Every structure is written in C-alpha cells, then in structure tokens.
Amino acid sequence: SLIYLRTICPWPVSDRDAVIQTKVSIKPDGSGARAEFNAVDLPEVPPVDGVVRLRVSEGAYYLSRISAQKTRVLYEVHSIPGGEVPSALAKRALEHLPHDSLFALAKRAVAMRGRYEEFRNRYDPARKH
C-alpha cells in the first residue's frame, strides 16, 4: 500500500512528509506478521512548499502473538530527517517516536475493530475453514 505521511513539527523545525510504501506479510499459521515500509519517490505526490520531504525512511513492525490478549511488537526505523533539526528535538523524537507510533496504532486498531470482517474471513489464516 501507499500512504502520504505528514509529521507536524514544533517550531522552529519545518514539518516533514513522505510517501510511504508498505508491504505486509502474515505467517501462514497466523502467529505473527511483518509490515515493512520505506519512503518512495512518487511524481504524482510532489513536495509541498515549506515541508521537508523525507527521502530516506525505512523500517518495519514485527508482531508476534503471545496470547489471545497480548502481542509482542518490535519496531525498527531508520530515517534521515533532512534540513536543520536541533539536537534536543531530534533526541526527544527518537525517545518518543516508537511509543507514540505504537500507541497510535493500538488506538486505531481498537477504533477499527469489527470493520474488516469480510477481509479477515478472506485473508486471515486462522479463520480458514
């Protein structure tokens, strides 16, 4: 999938954006999944004035089922923010980005619960009959 991602940054740092391509793979037994992502150049989505385009941003989420209620998540990312970024702000982002990203992902998963039953019935290996 392709998404447009824009990060609003605190002054004096300019906002950042990227076009992110993601590939998801699920283990056949449903016990885990991997979502690998990287920034891509997409001419249909030109840079925005005043926003720094991330040219290098890549990483992955690795999810492993621990139990029916728990999932282990490993998050890896490598990104070059471009432009000028004060070291204190860069350090804060590095410390908070993984937690904030996973928290937002969990919140979104709860909000979407039950909305993709047809998709899950078709593609979730654990639901195969």
Image (cartoon, helix red, strand yellow):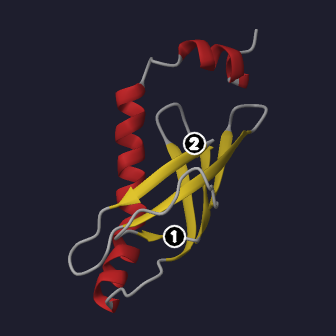
Question: What residue is shown with label 2?
Answer: 66
Question: What residue is shown with label 1?
Answer: 54
Q: What element does badge 1 sit on? A: loop
Residue 48 picture location, percent across and down = 41, 62
Residue at point 35%, 58% (across, down): 100
Give residue 58's quadrant in the image: bottom right
For the residue pair 72 and 81, the one nearer the viewer reads as 81
Extreme residue toward the right, this view: 28
14 relative position to 45: left or right: left
Residue 87 picture location, percent across and down = 34, 91
Q: Quadrant of the N terminus?
A: top right
Q: CA distance from mark 2 to mark 1?
A: 34 Å
Front: mark 2 or 1: 1
Residue 51 picture location, percent across and down = 38, 68
The mark that comes first in sequence, 2 or 1, is: 1
Residue 14 picture location, percent across and down = 31, 74
Residue at point 74%, 14% (across, down): 128
- Disc 2 marks a residue whose amino acid type is Ile
